[in-house]
């Protein structure tokens, strides 16, 4: 083989290995609804997550937001102003009764309100995208999953990792000899913020600051940890059996009792542990998951992913041409979706990172299920399991003790 032929072969190998595990070697195509007007949909919950959804929905031509619902008048008005010709509702039941044209609803309300809205929407025959965690109690998680079973509807949890192209790509590596044996998992969500929303009166203050209300909040581990927990479920293909935890108010000394810093250790039956950490006191290293393997470790950071090979791991040749990034004393190989085409064009570096937030891919995946009948990347059963485990992890952090995970929620 000539030097030129060998180089061409290796460049193709670099792209081919990115598709390991039969993962698609490209970014997903835009959702289409050929021959029809856009699918009419409704947003229920116009707070921070609802606003983020509206930004991503504006990129999806196959759907049109025709109604916005929020019980808070100011947020409802702001939400309606963001969407041309959308009708506003203060109650989700009124929306479902009046707007029979709405085919799908997106539930982005406070977590403890999810169950009633999801059950009403499923009962009304609407497709449902429910933010994760899907509920704030294990029983409510069970109720939503039970209501969805047997229905010819797309009922999908907002577990963004499973729809994320770089996470799908890295999943293939995690199941190969490139990583080999996963021996430990670490994950964190660090963001220096208060979680407190300014409000002009006590009633509105409690409604807006539900995350700080111990009667309904499932804390940092529950609200934020659910995404990392689901990624661990997915990558491992198994579930933890017990969880222990701890937490405290370390920074925001403003009278709150919901922890601003929390830890959870999830124990799998084969001895692997997921160590999860979340804080509102620091943004250091932000949000990521790390799967430590005997041949390589994979670091996932939602828009990016890297693989760190061990010195004694076997080489496959393509590493010579891979894009690399330095992390302190370690060098990571950047995992790039669509690597084959980019490698052929000599544009691997241009493919680093995703062009859209992970929320965009999760919403697109939901609409493929609703419009085309495609199987969603995350099922409502996945949502029940990840949400229930996250809730129990929060309970463990509050109790400072180990909590068993009931077998019936794991399937």
Image (spheres, rainbow, N blue to C red):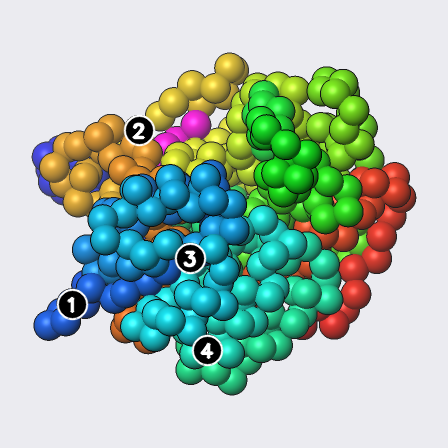
Q: 267 and 196: which one is in front? A: 196
The disc placed on residue 124 is: 4
Name the magenta segment's main secondary structure: strand
User: Residue 159: within the magenta?
Assistant: no
Residue 372: % across, % down: 28, 73
Q: State yes or no: discs 4 and 3 in contact (Cβ < 8 Å).
A: no
Residue 275: % across, % down: 70, 38
Q: Which callout, 2 or 1, points at the residue further toward the start of the chain?
A: 1
| 1 or 3: mark nearer the eye | 3
Q: Which callout, 4 or 1, points at the residue further toward the start of the chain?
A: 1
**Which of the 4 image quarters holds residue 344?**
top left
Q: 172 and 375: which one is in front? A: 375
* Disc 1/disc 3 C-alpha distance (Å): 23 Å
User: Is 238 placed above or below 161 here?
Assistant: below
Q: Which callout, 2 or 4, points at the residue further toward the start of the chain?
A: 4
Residue under circle 2? 323
Q: Is mark 1 on a helix, strand or loop?
A: loop
Range of magenta residues = 332-336
Q: Is mark 3 on a helix, strand or loop?
A: strand
The disc placed on residue 89 is: 3
Residue 85: % across, % down: 23, 53
């Amino acid at each position: 083989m000539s030097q030129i032929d060998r180089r061409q072969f290796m460049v193709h190998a670099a792209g081919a290995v990115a598709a390991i595990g039969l993962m698609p070697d490209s970014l997903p195509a835009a959702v289409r609804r050929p021959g029809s007007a856009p699918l009419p949909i409704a947003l229920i919950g116009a707070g921070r997550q609802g606003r983020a959804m509206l930004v991503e929905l504006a990129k999806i031509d196959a759907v049109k937001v025709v109604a916005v619902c929020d019980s808070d008048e100011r947020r409802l008005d702001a939400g309606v102003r963001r969407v041309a010709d959308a009708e506003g509702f203060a109650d989700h039941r009124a929306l479902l009764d009046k707007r029979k044209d709405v085919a799908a609803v997106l539930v982005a309300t406070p977590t403890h309100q999810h169950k009633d809205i999801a059950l009403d929407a499923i009962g009304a025959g609407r497709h449902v995208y429910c933010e994760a965690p899907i509920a704030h109690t294990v029983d409510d998680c069970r109720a939503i999953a039970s209501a969805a079973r047997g229905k010819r509807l797309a009922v999908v949890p907002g577990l963004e990792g499973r729809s994320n192209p770089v996470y799908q790509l890295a999943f293939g590596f995690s199941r190969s000899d490139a990583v080999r044996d996963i021996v430990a998992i670490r994950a964190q969500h660090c963001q220096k913020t208060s979680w407190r929303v300014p409000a002009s009166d006590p009633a509105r203050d409690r409604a807006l600051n539900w995350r700080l209300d111990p009667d309904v909040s499932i804390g940092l581990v529950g609200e934020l940890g659910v995404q990392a927990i689901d990624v661990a479920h997915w990558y491992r293909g198994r579930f933890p059996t017990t969880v222990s935890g701890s937490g405290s108010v370390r920074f925001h000394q403003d009278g709150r009792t919901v922890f601003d810093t929390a830890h959870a250790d999830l124990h799998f039956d084969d001895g692997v542990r997921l160590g999860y950490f979340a804080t509102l006191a620091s943004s250091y290293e932000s949000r990521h998951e790390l799967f430590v393997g005997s041949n390589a470790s994979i670091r996932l950071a939602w828009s990016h992913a890297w693989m760190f090979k061990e010195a004694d791991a076997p080489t496959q040749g393509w590493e010579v041409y891979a894009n690399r990034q330095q992390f302190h004393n370690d060098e990571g190989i950047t995992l790039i979706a669509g690597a084959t085409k980019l490698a052929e064009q000599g544009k691997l570096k241009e493919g680093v990172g995703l062009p859209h937030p992970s929320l965009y891919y999760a919403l697109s995946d939901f609409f493929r299920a609703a419009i085309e009948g495609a199987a969603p990347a995350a099922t409502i059963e996945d949502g029940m399991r990840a949400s229930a485990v996250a809730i129990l992890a929060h309970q463990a952090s509050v109790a400072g003790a180990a909590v068993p995970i009931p077998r019936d929620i794991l399937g």
